[in-house]
Amino acid sequence: MDDSLALLISETEIKQKVEEMGRKINHFYAGQDLDKLVVIGILRGSFIFMADLARQLTIPVELDFMDVSSYGRSSVTTGMVRILKDISEDITNKHVLLIEDIVDSGLTLKYLSKILWARSPRSLRICTLLNKPSRRRTELEPDFYGFMVPDEFIVGYGLDYAGKYRELPYLAIVKP
């Protein structure tokens, strides 16, 4: 491991948690009137988590993506969200599950939720691998989350710092 990183969550722990989250999501949607669940990943950070989670789902799904920017090359959100790629799927009257890597301030997801609710989905739920409520600047809370994490800058398993560390199979804290 790089000397500038400290292990936070191992590859094995992530795998077990993603399997558990898949079971919870399958159970949650099992009794609902569901043609298919539209699963929307927020690029780029969520792509590894979303791929692993999608393989755990036994319900019919349609996968789509949005690419947004709120961090730029900084470790702190700018508070301004730019949509770089919008979804392709029509979500009118469909159940939607928005997949994020980490819910930090909550500002990005609050903004995206507002945009998606304007498109009249039947339901909109938020799923994140990491939940960091100590940084929350809005009342938004994820419906499904894997790990509660400390107020540290985390990389690996899709999360990056200025484009580095996404490929790591574990989660680590960037040391100052």
Image (tube, rainbow, N blue to C red):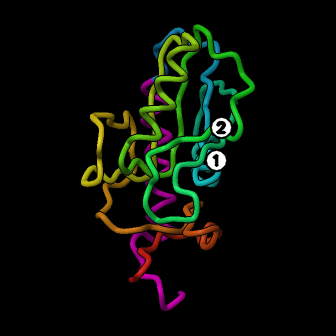
Rendered view: 96 above or below 43: above
Q: Would residue 17 be counted in the magenta stretch?
A: yes
N-terminal of the pair, mark 2 or mark 1, is 1
Element assignment for label 1:
strand
Rendered view: 167 above or below 136: below
Element assignment for label 2:
strand
On the image, the x and y values in percent for residue 140 come to 33, 34
Q: Give the amino acid at mark 2.
A: Met
**Image side of residue 40 versus residue 146, left or right:** right
Badge 1: residue crowd in 10 Å (few <14, some 14–19, many ≥20): many
- x 54%, y 22%: residue: 116
Q: Give the amino acid at mark 1.
A: Leu
- Residue in the foreground of this view, choosing between 172 and 162: 162
- x 36%, y 48%: residue: 105
Magenta highlight: main SS: helix
Q: Would residue 160 be counted in the magenta stretch?
A: no
> Any mark on residue 43, and which?
1
**Image side of residue 70 versus residue 48, left or right:** left
State which quarter of the image contains the C terminus.
bottom left
Residue extending furthest toward the bottom: 3
Q: Which residues are magenta?
A: 1-28
Residue of label 2: 66
Badge 2: residue crowd in 10 Å (few <14, some 14–19, many ≥20): some
On the image, the x and y values in percent for residue 120 come to 55, 10
Q: CA distance from mark 2 to mark 1?
A: 6 Å
The reply to whether the C-beta atoms of the residues labelled 2 and 1 are less than 8 Å apart is yes
- Residue in the foreground of this view, choosing between 165 and 111: 111
- Residue in the foreground of this view, choosing between 16 and 46: 46
- Residue in the foreground of this view, choosing between 163 and 31: 163
Residue 62 in which image quadrant:
top right
- x 72%, y 22%: residue: 89
On the image, the x and y values in percent for residue 87 come to 69, 29
